[in-house]
Image: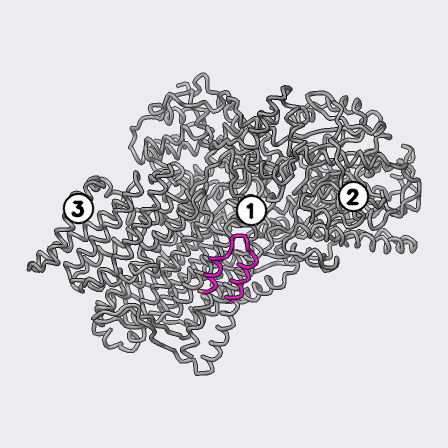
């Protein structure tokens, strides 16, 4: 049985690789490969669920390989299979199958045909990793894949401004959720002094009860991640904006699977925070508020997809309430129903014109005069809902405005200062650490905080940079070095660990920097004022830079992914400020590098009398 | 205080702006038109280059595409040389230009003069109006105009847009505007643009250019507002709105945004305007690019037209006199290019039939009211405003509903119920709907437009409704019947059954559905018109009256209405009029013939469908073709007007032996019965804007998908049931999506008329609006003189003799479509079996 679970992964991964290597015009080959892969997995799902039920449907847990092992640290894969995984797996497989079948013909002649299919396969892989994950580490891998594939599919029409802009917005919000998981992992590690699978949490309830604050913190961070991913308050505004890709991708991501992953996270971790009454009340209240507010917003939406997005978010709000109440079976049924309903509604959304015009043609009755009181009340809320309850403004004011405000402070971070002032500072710091000079506890903490604060400032500067993409890029590299330095002051990383963390960054930084210099050499703009759309002429470069970006942002493409987690575990439990600063730096630097990629390579198209451009923009 | 300083004339400025905005109807009334109608007073060549320089449109294929066509032989060398020789007298220059075209590099970015002023907000004030003002403005607009997507309606829509916004501002917790200055202006002042422009710009000479910058930053929305203002019938639920109100509000929002950022005191834009500002409509300097584009385009067009004309000449050279035998049956169809191939297959299947075509409303203009409908729907060309109403009574088939799409699913509690019940069952619907597509309630199905078994109120009995006369009198019937019969030359030799076949299309998940129906019926199926016209001609009193006009229809002749679904290649007959046994039998046999022709037509179309293997047996192919019209995932149910480039006005025999592919609109016309060109003028007045407009809309959507087309339709989002946009906050996207135009060759419509040039010249000049199209070459026009079998080409107000470049056209004896589509270099084919 355990081994059967493994079978879920090779097929989509192989299909992903095969499709990635196929020719751009080989539509039939690409779509058949994808469909076969998902078809096989769908059958497999049915078989495994059948077998599992025949074995009394008991939860399965099994530990897999370790990706890295240190003294106290062990990053291993772990899988878990129970009724929650079963429902998510089955629903996910059916919907993905439907979407791929649908897109085979729907996507015909799109210039991004191949890109669409490998991104969906990539997404699918992330999805099954997530729903089968048995520990935070495994879940995080899947979680990150979902994030990247989301970005890629929202920005599918990458030469247009709005899709790219909205993809960046969504990515930024996902990033906030990512930090929730990172922090939950950090605290979980300290709670058990080792890496533990979910099942340990489930089994060692006394330990959790004995540490209510830590458990509460973990629960809170999980909630943060779930809220961001499932478009709950205050994050709901991203969901309609994500509807920029081809309709089937909107259906699979924002109608059904991706958007319900937050609910999955809560279902999966329920035993961890089960006894945190306050947290459960919080979840229920946020769910309720989301349900109310997004319903009101949905009611005023004059576009089909906007309406579906908000109605879906409202139902997920109710699902959150059901989960908080411990009604997991009801929540699962609700998830399945909502996922299929929204998928169907989105897939037929272009038909709404014919359908509703006809309905109206035969059934129209002018709106009845309501009692003035009720109407006044409704009108009062109308404008507020039309403005989406200022949700965007809230996020902007809390997260992004402070970042932008820092621009004034950050003028000193020029390339030259970086080299001549911060370079020596870094070296001095490194010397202090490795020469084993005895430092007082306070001084060490101060150095530690100072370095990490500098790192955060660099990331912020990079995020605010408008003139030069290379500078913004180098700043992120420097930020990673200062984080390493700062954390080492706190609790020395050994050379091997430092290497794991930094090699990925350095390799990515170098390859990315080379892409940028190559662009500059060819006379292309590398400032960040506007979107330049270099992907029009330089597709290969764009691809390499995208990979470098992912490496820099700590996505599971290089060892930095492990490194980020590793760095966090070295921050001891008593330094939440340090942990917070490091996490913030991770968020900001992730957003910043994707912003560089988007501004330099995406978001615009220039027309030319000589050369033709894509028809499918 | 004088709010109207001299120099800026508000009404004039708005009218000027409106002239250039896209003018596309709501989706339900979609009709094709010339996308660059604003430039039509200029010559095609001048207009296209100017539009490109001023608005940043690309107006021709890219030069690389032209050279690729040349390499593939789709632009022929001899034609290119001839084009060059016509353009340049000097042989040296011809040579220079030929080299320049083939090797030249005109690698220049297409830039636009728009945005010079408005971009200054971003550059000098660090304020992006696109981010701060636009999204909210669009939400207000789409909320106000919404026709039935939102559950909560925009409050106070009765009295106009600005009025509703004012009320909203006072009634809500959060106002529309934040600061007192803008609020005061909204509530207190009259709606006048100059004072606001003064605050924003402070320099009168910049006003108009700023308005263009502002409105063209969301031209889709502005254009739609302008369309609604002019023709409110575009919306079923009426909304009062004007472009001026939108501009007024947008400027208030801009002032509010500036006040928010800088307080009350900020410098108007004029302080930052550089001396290098190019006025929007200042002279456009000529350029080599322009010449290159014009030459390539001509060579491209004439490579095709040359072969068509050659084909006509070669087949007409051996023309035999038409037989006087009574045909087995006759058909009268629409001039639509999609019926052209069907006519060819009919002749192929049954050489003893005769076919005619006329615009598919069959000369009968009226509003149609299906039973129980709350509204009327226009059933004639869009510019006509009919005075008649036809009602449907006694419907037997009823609309199906899809509860999964009900608005209940967007409520809180009802949404919960829906998700847990219908939501789960939609899993099954998804799987069956995708694996086994069939007719479904969300699709647009042409046969549903009118119930075959329902009755129509065609006779006038004294009833009036909403100022419309219900039904027609005998005189009204006669005059309409007479006009059509005379214009197409069907005045004698009537067959026992004459099928009057309207057309429509069926599709699902297709927001452009109206564009697939009959354009002459205002984007509706032509079923009602066909049935009404047949009724006219079956009426004894009408026949008596026609007899007096010299048209005698034998008693044995029966007119039968029908509807051809061009997507599914199916015909529905309104054959309840056939009662006599002899006719029943003939009808049965004819139906078989028509069915065969439909299958052959479906097979021909399948060559252009990547998902169908054209070597399958015809009935199998037909099934697959039908399936396309009901498949949710099929963005191309049919190719519609793709590849349309010809309009033939003449007898069918002119092209009867040519394989033209599907590129021709054909209007039956017999020059022998119209020596003065009286009927020809009527035909051209209707056909030129229609087929000319279609060709130009396809043209511009093809050459500039980004700005003049709608982009790929896959990410489209339906807004308010009246338009599509990208995402939830993008601009509306007028024009055609890539899925409609991607295999279209952008050519102008070429009219070939069978008549004497002298007659044609006289009638053309009698109608200035029509003449503008032709003189400015937005369509091309040639005349085939049937008496000496010579071509004349119209240019600059005169006809010149035209001799096609000789070459041998390929001859085929059977299955021309296979030959055509398998040919590496397809062109006009001569069909050897004679059935014309």
Identified at 35% across, 39% down, the residue is A521
What SS does tag 3 mark?
helix
Q: Could you tell me what secondary structure mostly forms the magenta stretch?
A: helix
How many residues crowd mark 3 within 10 Å: few (<14), some (14–19), many (20+)?
some
Is A25 magenta? The answer is: yes
User: Share a chain, discs 3 and 2?
Assistant: no
What SS does tag 1 mark?
loop
Rendered image quadrant of residue A80: bottom left
Specify whether A516 is left or right of A153.
left
Q: Mark 3 highlights which residue?
A: A422
What SS does tag 2 mark?
strand
The residue stretch that appears in magenta: A14-38
Rendered image quadrant of residue B334: top right
**x, y percent for residue B83:** 65, 27
Against B483, residue A132 (above or below) is below
Q: Mark 2 highlights which residue?
A: B811
Residue B721's label in the rendered image is 1
Identified at 92% across, 44% down, the residue is B326
């Amino acid at each position: 049985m355990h081994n059967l679970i493994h079978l879920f992964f090779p097929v989509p991964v192989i299909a992903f690789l095969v499709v990635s290597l196929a020719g751009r015009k080989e539509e039939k080959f690409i779509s058949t490969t994808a469909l076969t892969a998902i078809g096989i997995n769908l059958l497999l799902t049915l078989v495994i669920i059948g077998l599992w039920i025949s074995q009394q449907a008991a939860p399965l847990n099994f530990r897999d390989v370790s990706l890295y092992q240190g003294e106290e640290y062990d990053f291993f894969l772990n899988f878990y299979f129970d009724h929650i995984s079963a429902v998510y797996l089955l629903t996910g497989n059916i919907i993905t199958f439907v979407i791929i079948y649908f897109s085979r013909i729907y996507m015909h002649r799109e210039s991004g045909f191949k890109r669409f299919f490998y991104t969906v396969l990539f997404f699918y892989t992330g999805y099954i990793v997530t729903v089968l994950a048995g520990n935070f580490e495994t879940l995080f891998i899947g979680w990150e894949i979902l994030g990247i594939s989301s970005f890629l599919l929202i920005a599918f029409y990458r030469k247009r401004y709005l899709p790219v802009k909205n993809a960046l917005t969504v990515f930024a919000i996902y990033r906030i959720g990512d930090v929730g998981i990172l922090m939950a992992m950090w605290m979980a590690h300290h709670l058990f002094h080792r890496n533990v699978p979910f099942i340990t949490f489930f089994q060692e309830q006394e330990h959790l009860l004995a540490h209510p604050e830590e458990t509460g913190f973990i629960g809170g961070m999980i909630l943060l991640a779930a809220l961001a991913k499932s478009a709950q308050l205050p994050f709901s505004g991203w969901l309609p904006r994500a509807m920029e890709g081809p309709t089937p991708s909107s259906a699979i991501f924002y109608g059904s699977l991706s958007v319900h992953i937050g609910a999955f996270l809560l279902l999966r971790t329920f035993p961890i925070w089960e006894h945190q009454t306050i947290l459960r009340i919080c979840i229920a209240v946020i769910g309720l508020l989301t349900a109310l507010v997004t319903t009101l917003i949905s009611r005023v939406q004059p576009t089909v997809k906007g309406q579906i997005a908000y109605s879906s978010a409202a139902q997920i709000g109710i699902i959150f309430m059901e989960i908080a109440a411990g009604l997991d079976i009801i929540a699962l049924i609700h998830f399945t129903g909502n996922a299929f309903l929204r998928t169907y509604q989105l897939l037929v959304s272009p038909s709404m014109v014919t359908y509703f015009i006809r309905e109206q043609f035969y059934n129209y009755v002018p709106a009845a005069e309501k009692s003035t009181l009720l109407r006044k009340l409704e009108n009062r809320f109308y404008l507020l809902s039309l403005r989406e309850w200022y949700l965007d403004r809230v996020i902007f004011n809390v997260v992004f405005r402070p970042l932008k405000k820092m621009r004034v402070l950050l003028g000193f971070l020029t390339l030259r200062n970086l080299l001549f002032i911060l370079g020596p500072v870094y070296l001095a710091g490194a010397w202090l650490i490795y020469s084993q000079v005895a430092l007082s506890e306070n001084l060490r903490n101060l150095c530690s905080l100072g370095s990490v604060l500098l790192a955060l400032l660099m990331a912020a500067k990079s995020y605010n940079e408008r003139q030069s993409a290379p500078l913004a890029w180098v700043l992120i590299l420097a930020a990673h070095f200062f984080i390493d330095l700062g954390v080492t002051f706190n609790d020395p990383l050994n050379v091997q660990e430092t290497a794991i963390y930094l090699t990925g960054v350095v390799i990515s930084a170098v390859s990315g920097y080379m892409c940028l210099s190559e662009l500059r050499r060819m006379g292309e703009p590398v400032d960040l004022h506007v979107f330049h759309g270099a992907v029009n002429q330089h597709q290969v470069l764009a691809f390499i830079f995208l990979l470098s970006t992912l490496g820099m942002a700590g996505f599971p493409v290089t060892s930095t992914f492990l490194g980020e987690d590793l760095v966090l575990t070295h921050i001891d439990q008593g330094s939440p400020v340090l942990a917070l600063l490091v996490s913030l730096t991770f968020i900001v630097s992730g957003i910043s590098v994707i912003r560089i990629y988007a501004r330099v390579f995406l978001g615009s198209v220039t027309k030319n009398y000589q050369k033709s451009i894509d028809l499918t923009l | 205080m004088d709010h109207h300083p001299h120099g800026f004339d508000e009404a004039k400025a708005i009218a000027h702006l409106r002239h250039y905005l896209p003018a596309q109807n709501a989706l339900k009334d979609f009709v094709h038109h010339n996308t660059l109608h604003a430039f039509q007073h200029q010559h095609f060549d001048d207009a296209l280059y100017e539009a490109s320089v001023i608005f940043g449109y690309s107006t021709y294929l890219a030069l690389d595409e032209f050279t690729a066509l040349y390499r593939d032989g789709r632009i022929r060398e001899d034609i290119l040389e001839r084009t060059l020789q016509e353009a340049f007298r000097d042989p040296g220059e011809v040579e220079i230009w030929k080299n320049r075209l083939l090797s030249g590099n005109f690698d220049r970015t297409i830039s636009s003069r728009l945005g010079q002023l408005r971009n200054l907000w971003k550059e000098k004030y660090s304020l992006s109006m696109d981010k701060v003002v636009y999204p909210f403005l669009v939400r207000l607009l789409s909320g106000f105009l919404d026709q039935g997507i939102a559950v909560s309606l925009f409050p106070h829509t009765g009295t106009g847009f600005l009025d509703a916004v004012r009320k909203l501002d006072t009634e809500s917790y959060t106002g529309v505007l934040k600061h007192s200055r803008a609020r005061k202006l909204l509530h207190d002042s009259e709606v006048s643009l100059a004072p606001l422009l003064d605050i924003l710009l402070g320099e009168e000479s910049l006003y108009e250019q700023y308005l263009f910058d502002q409105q063209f930053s969301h031209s889709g929305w502005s254009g739609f507002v302008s369309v609604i203002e002019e023709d409110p019938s575009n919306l079923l639920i009426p909304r009062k709105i004007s472009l001026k109100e939108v501009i007024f509000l947008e400027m208030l929002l801009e002032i509010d945004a500036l006040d928010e950022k800088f307080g009350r005191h900020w410098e108007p834009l004029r302080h930052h305007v550089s001396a290098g500002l190019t006025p929007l409509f200042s002279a456009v300097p000529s350029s080599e690019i322009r010449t290159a584009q014009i030459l390539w385009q001509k060579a491209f067009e004439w490579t095709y037209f040359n072969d068509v004309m050659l084909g006509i000449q070669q087949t007409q050279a051996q023309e035999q006199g038409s037989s006087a035998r009574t045909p087995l049956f006759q058909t009268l169809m629409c001039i639509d290019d999609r019926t052209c191939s069907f006519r060819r297959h009919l002749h192929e299947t049954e050489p003893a039939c005769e076919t005619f075509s006329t615009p598919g409303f069959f000369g009968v203009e009226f509003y149609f009211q299906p039973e129980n409908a709350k509204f009327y729907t226009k059933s004639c060309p869009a510019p006509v405003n009919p005075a008649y109403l036809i009602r449907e009574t006694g419907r037997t088939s009823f609309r199906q509903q899809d509860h999964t799409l009900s608005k209940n699913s967007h409520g809180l509690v009802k949404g919960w119920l829906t998700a847990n019940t219908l939501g789960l069952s939609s899993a099954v619907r998804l799987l069956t709907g995708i694996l086994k597509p069939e007719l479904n309630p969300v699709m647009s199905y042409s046969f549903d437009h009118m119930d075959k078994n329902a009755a129509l109120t065609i006779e006038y009995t004294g009833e009036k409704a909403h100022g419309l006369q219900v039904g027609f009198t005998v005189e009204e019937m006669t005059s309409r019947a007479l006009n059509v019969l005379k214009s197409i030359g069907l005045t004698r030799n009537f067959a026992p059954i004459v099928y009057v076949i309207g057309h429509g299309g069926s599709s699902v998940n297709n927001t452009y559905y109206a564009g697939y129906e009959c354009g002459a019926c205002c984007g509706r199926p032509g079923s009602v018109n066909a049935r009404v016209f047949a009724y006219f001609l079956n009426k004894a009193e009408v026949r008596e009256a026609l007899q007096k006009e010299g048209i005698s229809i034998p008693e044995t002749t029966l007119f039968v209405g029908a509807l051809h679904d061009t997507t599914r290649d199916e015909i529905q007959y309104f054959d309840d009029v056939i009662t006599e046994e002899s006719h029943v039998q003939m009808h049965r046999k004819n139906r078989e013939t028509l069915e065969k022709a439909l299958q052959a037509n479906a097979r021909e179309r399948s060559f252009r469908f990547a998902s169908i293997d054209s070597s399958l047996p015809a009935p199998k192919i037909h099934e697959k073709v039908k399936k396309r019209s009901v498949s949710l995932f099929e963005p191309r149910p049919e190719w519609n007007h793709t590849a349309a480039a010809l309009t033939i006005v003449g007898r069918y025999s002119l092209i009867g032996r040519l394989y033209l592919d599907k590129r021709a609109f054909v209007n039956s016309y017999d020059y022998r019965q119209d020596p003065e060109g009286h009927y020809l003028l009527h035909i051209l007045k209707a056909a030129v804007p229609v087929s000319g407009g279609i060709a130009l809309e396809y043209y511009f959507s093809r050459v500039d998908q980004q700005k003049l087309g709608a982009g790929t339709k896959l990410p489209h989002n339906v807004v308010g049931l009246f338009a599509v946009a990208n995402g939830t906050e993008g601009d509306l996207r007028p024009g055609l999506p890539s899925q409609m135009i991607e295999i279209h060759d952008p050519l102008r419509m070429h009219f070939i008329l069978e008549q004497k040039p002298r007659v044609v010249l006289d009638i053309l000049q009698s109608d200035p609006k029509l003449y503008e199209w032709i003189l400015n070459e937005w369509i091309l026009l040639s005349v085939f003189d049937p008496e000496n079998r010579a071509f004349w080409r119209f240019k600059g107000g005169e006809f010149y003799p035209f001799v096609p470049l000789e070459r041998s056209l390929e001859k085929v004896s059977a299955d021309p479509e296979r030959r055509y589509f398998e040919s590496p270099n397809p062109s006009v084919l001569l069909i050897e079996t004679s059935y014309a």
